[in-house]
Amino acid sequence: MIGCLQPDELSERIDETGKVNKPVNQIRLENVEAENWLTHGRTYSEWRHSPLQQINTSNINQLELVWWYELKSDRGVESTPIVVDGTMYVTGPWSVVSALNAATGEELWVYDPEVPKETASFACCDVVNRGVSFWQGKVYLGSLDGRLIAIDAQSGKEVWSTLTIEPGQPYTITGAPRVANGLVFIGNGGAEYGVRGYVSAYEADSGALRWRFYTVPGNPSAPPDDAASDQVLREVALETWTGEWWRYGGGGTVWDAIVYDPDTGYLLIGVGNGSPHDRNIRSPGGGDNLFLSSIVALMADTGEYVWHYQTTPGDTWDFTAAQQIILGEAEVNGNRRKVLWQAPKNGFFYMLDRTTGEFLSAEPYTTVNWAKRIDPETGRPVETQGSRYDSGTVLIQPAVFGGHNWQPMSYNPETGLVYIPALDTAVPWSVDPMFKHQPGWWNTGVPGPRFPPNEEVIAEIKASSKSYLRAWNPVTQEEAWSVELKGPWNGSNMNTSGNLVFQGTADGRFEAYNATTGEKLWERKTGVATLGGPVSYSVAGEQYIAVPGGFGSMLFLALPILMDAKAIPKQRGRVFVYKLGGQASLPPPLDFQKLIPAPPQLEADAEQVARGADVYQYYCWQCHGANAISAGVLPELRASAALHSEEAWHAIVLGGALSAQGMPKFEQWISETDAESLRAYVTTEARRALDSDAQQQTQKH
Ligand code: CA
């Protein structure tokens, strides 16, 4: 292997003061010490299992907060910190990195890539970041606006920065880079907007591009990309597409799972959904559309294609296979096999041979109705008739959120179980008769969610949207135990040799369960949605448990209608750190009661309001919330003073008066007439909220 150091370089790594003596190199990354969390999933296997056991089932009741650190934003937090020899590197919203003393929380440095705020309009699911990687004294960050940045781990100063995307294209980076043998691997997101997915490898020292692999074919009449993917796209993928998909980008973004397998030298990538979502637009003659919704194995040093397995052929439901990939070993029909496990959005838990890509087994880990099963002979789903919504609206399970989304799951080699932060939700799918391709904007080809303004119906949808911590035997493909969490969205988990699973929740708690039985042993309130990846590490012989939490994220931006919006704690993101006998405490949570002030008198007819609702559904719900209901992350439009002034409203919506705060100008997409309809619609919703509040007040008295 390239870049390997001699084993003696592993000795005396840390001196008495905890100072780093040896660099993080390939040997260390393949042999992560128990006290560290050196890479996104702790090790290359992405088990998120810490061998530490000082904190265990018998003393967990003494686990208390020892320090907390405020991330400087109330936007979404999806980060997993890494811990290198007593220093924690954690990312917050807007791709800001903080280096902290892992024992005390003391801030060592903060690196802010100063992402332009208007980038937010290209981020489907808030301005989140899932973490950094570490190699030879440098921290590697993918910034929301598409840069890959190397930061000096001691000083926090930028060493190099390279733009990984074409300027102006609606790509974003939210995922953690990965490093192996001196190469940094990074993908991107943007398939809801209409982009073409790819993954790239850069030299860790210089930032020079080594190779790039596109996941879907480009325009066949254009010259080849001169990329590692050229041959396989031409010979394997091209024939699985029809129509003029390249006009829409095609999708297939590699926005999360990028896993180096030291046993094979392969880089395993999880590929995202199609763009637009509706296959009939993207590829009207049908077809599997390789390599959408697939796991693809590449040679890590060259990007050369090795094998692929497609979880959802001809994806039409936003069923990404970008979810975490875990490397394991399993006894299959009497043979020891090197396997991988994945629980992608489509609801099936997969076991594949990771040396060949051979399909071994798949069973549903949550409620699935789009397919009956995965055919064991072909490895292809047996689809339910009508599930492609070409003959009318259908309720599809899992919903667009997936049976499991970006929230990391974990594997415990001692219990042999994978702990899945599972979701059980359903949303209707239908074609969008109004669809027109709008380059640079949301292009899913399906209508955004619009809930009937009926409290009972909404209460029913809320009640049927469930989240679970589900322990799954990945070899026998059976549930070992399952506990219901709260709300329609989920946090992440990790487990330890203390026989514990730590799980965060969307409603502001951090919990621990017995890893064998699922018995709940511990819970502390964090006061903020605790979605980030928990980690464990030790400093000077003392074990710590850490978890980042924050407001924002897709649920709180787009769908607070599914939560009790007024009960959601709003405060800045934080990293919460616990140890046995910790003595810290949190300040009281901010009181968040957003009252809707009286909206202006409406001078619009029903037709104009309906048009405004359509416009809202195209351009606004993604950030300001379905049905114009906000959780308060972004300004509550129903409370906007600009509703009272046509001039002010147009200056903001069309003219970009608030672009410095991240509100893009929409003049290229929304006409003045439509902006007025939009104002009429939001005013109507404000009036409805006011009337409903007044009604509730009357009922109370
Ligand atoms: Ca998607």
Image (cartoon, grey):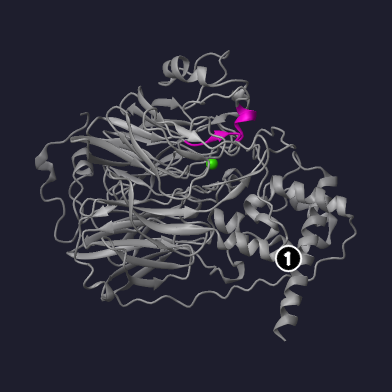
Expressed as whole percent of the image width and height from the top left, the position of residue 400 reads 55, 46
Image quadrant in which the C terminus is located: bottom right
- The residue depicted at 24 percent of the width and 30 percent of the height is 264
Residue 545 magenta-drawn?
A: no
> Is residue 97 in sight in this rendering?
no
* Amino acid carrying mark 1 in the image: Ala
- The residue depicted at 51 percent of the width and 18 percent of the height is 238
In this rendering, the answer to whether 422 lies above or below 567 is above
In this rendering, the answer to whether 387 lies above or below 218 is below
- The residue depicted at 23 percent of the width and 44 percent of the height is 24
How crowded is the residue under tag 1: few (<14 C-alpha within 10 Å), some, or many (20+)?
some
Expressed as whole percent of the image width and height from the top left, the position of residue 454 reads 71, 63
Query: Seen in the image, is 188 located left or right of residue 414?
Result: right
The picture quadrant where one finds residue 443 is top right
Image quadrant in which the N terminus is located: top left
Query: Seen in the image, is 242 located left or right of residue 256?
Result: right
Q: Nearer the viewer, residue 416 or 90?
A: 416
Expressed as whole percent of the image width and height from the top left, the position of residue 684 reads 80, 61
Tag 1 residue: 639
The picture quadrant where one finds residue 362 is top left
> Is residue 43 in sight in this rendering?
yes
Q: Quadrant of ligand 1?
A: top right
Q: Which residues are magenta?
A: 272-282
